[in-house]
Structures are given as C-alpha cells and as structure tokens.
Image: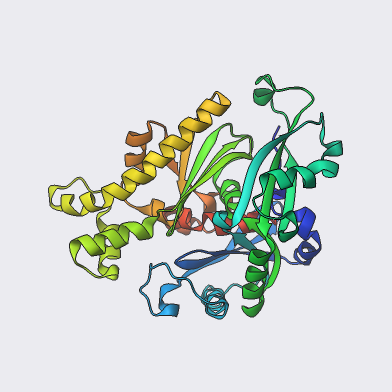
Amino acid sequence: MDISLKDLSFKKLLGGLQAALKDKQSVLGVDIGGSSVKVVQLRKEKERAILETYGEVALGPYGGLKIGQNIKLPEDKIAEAVRDVVKESNAKATAAKVAIPLRSSFVKIITLPVADDSNISEIIAMEARRHIPIPVSEVALDWWAIPKTSDNKNQAKPTNSTEVLLVAIHNDVINDYKNIIKKAGLEAASYEIEAFSVVRSAISRGSPTIAVVDFGSASTKMAVVDYGIIKSSHLINKGSHDITLAMAQSLGVDFAKAEEMKKEIGLSDLPEHQEIVDVMKPILDYIFHEIGVFLKDFQARHNRSVSKIIFTGGGSLLKGLSGHGVKRLTVEVEAADPFGKTEHPVFLDKILKEIGPNFSVATGLALGEL
C-alpha cells in the first residue's frame, strides 16, 4: 500500500486555490532554482500526460552575471525571468504549480500515540510545536498519516502508534512565491516542496526503499523513499555551481569557460584531463561522503538499505557522475527519466532522456495536477 504522491502538495491548506486548476486543460510546473527557471506544461488526455512544451532560462544575466551562476534576484527580476521562459517556450497555461525549495521547508516523520488517523487532527498542532523550530502560527502546516505496509508492519512498532509525515513552509516564503507568480502574469494554483515533485517524476508508485539524489546548482538534496513516502531527507550546501567556481579559480579561467569545460570534459579518465578532474574531485568527494553517511544513518535507523539510487537535477548531467556514484556508494545508480512518464513525439525521445533530469521538479509539479 502506498500513499498517493498526488496528495503531497498542501491540498488541505491550499485547496481553495487549487480549484482554479480543475477547469484548466493544461497545467504549468514552475521550478525557480538558484541559477535558472524551468517550466514544463502538460495536458491530461484520456488518463495520459501529454507533454506540450518545456523551457529553461538562466537567471545570471538578469543580474549582470554569467549563465549558470547562482544569483539572488529581487522579485521583479525573477518574475521577468518567469515571463520570459513562458513566452520563449510558448506555454499557454496560466494556472501554475510552484516548487518550494527544500531549504525553505520542514519535512519530518513523527510518531503519534494513536492507533489510527481519526484523532490525529486534534493533536497535530500540539505535536508540531515540539518539532518545528518556529511558531506554528508562522507556517503553513500539513500532515499525512503513513499507511502501514507489509514492511513497516514487521518492524515491531507499537500497534497503538501511527507514523505521520509532517511538513511546513513559512508563510513569508509562500507569500514571496505568490508575489513572483502574480507579477509574472500567472495564477499560483498550488505549491509543493520540491522533494515531493522529484519523487513523483522519478519513482514509480509502490517502489520499495529507493534513494533520490537531486544535484542542484546551489545544493544537493537527498531523500529516501519507501513505497512513495519520503522517510528521510537531507540537504548538502554544495552543488554544481561550487564545482564551476572551483574550476574557474584553480584553472585561472572565467566562469563561462569553466562551465563549458565542466560540461564537455566531465569526469573524464583521459590523462590530458586529469588536472581538470582533480579540481572537481574534492567537492564531489564531500558530496558523496555526505550521501554515504545519510544512507548509512537511514539503514541503522530502519534496519534496511536502499536498493537503488536515482540521480536527478541539472548537476547530475555531469559526464561520468553515475559511474562515479556506483564506485563510491556501491549501489545501483540510474538517471531520472521524468519525461518517460509523458507522451511526446518519438523523435524527441533521445533529447528528452538526456535533459530529463534537469526538469524533474517541473515535470513532477505538473504531473501532480493531472
């Protein structure tokens, strides 16, 4: 038994806003990252997700920086970037589902002393105060009772307890994104923590114990997913942008050249590329060390290990990264294929599979509303 990933989007709190999507034929997933904005537009047709368009625009140039550089822009500039990518991709949907960064969210599994979920709503606010580090009045709070699977039934947990997935987003964060989307001329129909969107697009329902590693520009996000439920998550404050910066500084080239070299060479094993790869390795070693610690901690707490790791995010497109991951983590690694869950022209198969990991969040957002 698994909980529907379609439910993990603050529907209880924001259900009124989501009504706007019901009469829309198409939905737009909007992923505002540290270095770019990505959109994916899908349409539901006879239970199928039809890919209508997708697009990405770099944020750096909106603040005088290079393509690929992380930048903190004011709302007006981000809204301008959203408008531009919508226009350039020829997206027509006005109802948008928007990703909230994991770093701006709170996600935790808690155990409540109740046998079922009938009484949870009465005690969740009180319990939330014990776990959330800021006043509950300042956050949008939601929760889901985790269904008991055959696996977790065998973990000898008390029968009079229920595991609950507790999630919260600061009200100020939601208001910031609401303002951006409104200024961009769209309607923010709902919001979702990015980790849930990635899981929806990268993992099939019912899959037991899989880890998802999202290599972003500013950070690397990890989640262990068990039967569709995020059982544990962690964020590392290092991403692909840090690799490019290290290359630029160490090799004496500008950011644009370093980004180009990173994409072209990747983790090449050719002798002539060794100097470049050696610059990347310390950051990658740190990231993979953190991933390993995270997975070992999960195994110790839950008495089982992950069966597979799925790499996603723009940083996962680094050549040779999957092979490096297998060596470091000794677990099967595969690249996410979010567009594989959509119908699209056959001639696009190759390119969509190649770029897919970069659009996992945006695709997962749109899939959640179909």
220 over 324 or under it: above or below:
below
Q: Name the one closer to the observer, 302 or 56.
A: 302
Which quadrant holds residue 2?
top right
Residue pictured at 43% horizontal, 79% vertical: 63
Indicate left or right for 56 with 7 as reference.
left
- x, y percent for residue 233: 55, 43
Image quadrant where one finds the N terminus: top right
Farthest left residue in view: 272
33 over 118 or under it: above or below:
below
- x, y percent for residue 312: 46, 49
Res. 352 visible in picture: no
- x, y percent for residue 213: 47, 45
Indicate left or right for 50 with 356 as reference.
right
Image quadrant where one finds the C terminus: bottom right
Residue pictured at 35% horizontal, 58% vertical: 242
How many numbered marks appear? Answer: 0
- x, y percent for residue 85: 52, 74
Indicate left or right for 91 with 150 as reference.
left
255 over 226 or under it: above or below:
below
Res. 136 visible in picture: yes
